[in-house]
Image (cartoon, rainbow, N blue to C red):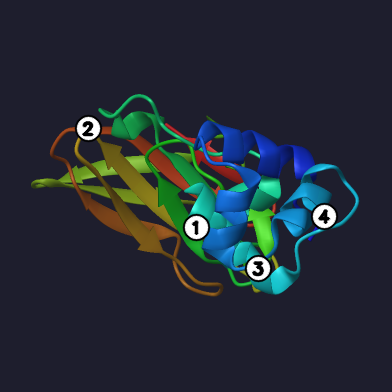
Amino acid sequence: MDRYVTGAVIRRLREKKKITQEELADIIHVSGKAVSKWETGQGFPDISLLEPLAQALGISVIELLSGEDIRNPNRSFNMAKGKFYVCPVCGNVIIATGETVVSCCGITLPPLEAEPSDEEHAIRKEIAEDEYFVSVDHPMTKEHYISFLAAVSDFGVQLVKLYPEGSAEGRFKIDRVKILYAYCNRHGLFRI
């Protein structure tokens, strides 16, 4: 964990909920003096209190630790503006359609920034009936490979997880596909 919850964050979130220190203390079963100490920086909540504290403040534990509550004011979203996250430990692929804090294997993950497809990561597409056959001419060794291919339309994401020593190819329904992605485990996310 790169940082712990601060008193200023607790105070800001408590005041936003319009509750007193005593009311917060009652909710999480601690003394009002304990909440006062946290908010003035004279102490920190015990780790066992993080979940009830976050719940009382109406946010997730990750949001509490990051110091900000994440809310997407735009309730309608555009799938093309979605974000991909990849865990460097387990390889988990996570897709988010709005602002979020993503954590996997104890690591807070940054969103991937897609670059235009380049020579080494050239994404090719061929039409086969109602599908795109997508391939990337790329090494697929255990150390360096394309981890996934994705097709994003205005109504969803199609994803094909790939594995080392396999083929860097997949099939996607053409219907309204706007962007194709390929993720290299060494060089990042590419798009066409």
Q: Mark 4, mark 2: which one is toward the viewer?
A: 4
Identify residue for label 2. Answer: 154
Q: Amino acid at mark 4?
A: Asp
Report the residue at 50% width, 43% height from top: 100
Report the residue at 30% width, 40% height from top: 152
Q: Which mark is residue 2?
A: 4
User: Which is more toward the observer, 189 or 120?
Assistant: 189
Identify residue for label 1. Answer: 55
User: Which is more toward the observer, 78 or 146?
Assistant: 78
Q: Amino acid at mark 3?
A: Leu
Identify residue for label 3. Answer: 49
Q: Mark 1, mark 2: which one is toward the viewer?
A: 1
Of pointers 4 and 3, the one earlier in the residue sequence = 4
Report the residue at 62% width, 51% height from top: 22
Q: Amino acid at mark 1?
A: Gln
Q: Mark 3, mark 2: which one is toward the viewer?
A: 3
Q: Is residue 112 above or below residue 4?
A: above
Q: Estimate the x, y position of residue 42 in percent, counting from the top left.
A: 91, 51
| Labels 1 & 2 near each other (Cβ < 8 A) | no
Q: Is residue 175 above or below residue 61?
A: above
Q: Give the quarter of the image for residue 33.
A: bottom right
The C terminus sits in image quarter: top left
Q: Estimate the x, y position of residue 31 in percent, counting from the top left.
A: 70, 62
Mark 3 and mark 2: Cα distance apart in space: 41 Å
